[in-house]
Image: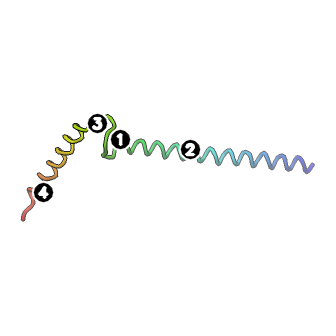
């Protein structure tokens, strides 16, 4: 009889470990999805962007920023 109790307890512990592992995997999958979504929102170097395109983009961004500063009173 005690052997059945131990077997049941071991089965419950096995299910608990599987549930914890599944919860961690789900949490990591959610984190990965969030990080991938942020890569589309955050500015940065695009892998398909050439150096010439990146330089042109930076020049445009700097020009827009300077235009904003030129309108400031002295």
The quarter of the rendered structure image containing the C terminus is bottom left
Q: Which mark is residue 49?
A: 3
Q: Nearer the viewer, residue 44 or 30?
A: 44
Q: Nearer the viewer, mark 2 or mark 1?
A: 1
Q: Nearer the viewer, residue 47 or 25?
A: 47
Q: Which mark is residue 58?
A: none
Q: CA distance from mark 4 to mark 1?
A: 28 Å
Q: Which residue is mark 2?
A: 26
Left or right of residue 22: residue 34:
left
Residue depicted at 13% across the width and 53% down the height: 66
Q: Which x, y percent locates residue 67?
A: 11, 51
N-term mark: 2 or 1: 2
Q: CA distance from mark 2 to mark 4?
A: 47 Å
Q: Nearer the viewer, mark 3 or mark 1?
A: 3
Q: Is residue 49 above or below residue 34?
A: above
N-term mark: 2 or 4: 2
Q: CA distance from mark 3 to mark 4?
A: 28 Å
Residue depicted at 16% across the width and 52% down the height: 65
Q: Which residue is mark 1?
A: 40
Q: CA distance from mark 2 to mark 3?
A: 33 Å
Q: Are marks 3 and 4 in contact (CB under 8 Å)?
A: no
Q: Which x, y percent locates residue 51?
A: 25, 38
Mark 3: few, some, or many residues within 10 Å (few <14, many ≥20)? few
Q: Which residue is mark 4?
A: 69
Q: Nearer the viewer, residue 53 or 39?
A: 53
Q: Are marks 4 and 1 in contact (CB under 8 Å)?
A: no
N-term mark: 2 or 3: 2
């Amino acid at each position: 009889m005690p052997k059945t109790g131990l077997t049941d307890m071991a089965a419950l512990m096995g299910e608990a470990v599987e549930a914890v592992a599944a919860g961690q995997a789900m949490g990591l999958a959610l984190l990965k999805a969030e990080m991938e979504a942020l890569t589309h929102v955050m500015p940065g170097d695009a892998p398909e962007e050439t150096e010439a395109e990146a330089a042109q983009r930076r020049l445009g961004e700097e020009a827009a920023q300077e235009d904003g500063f030129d309108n400031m009173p002295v």
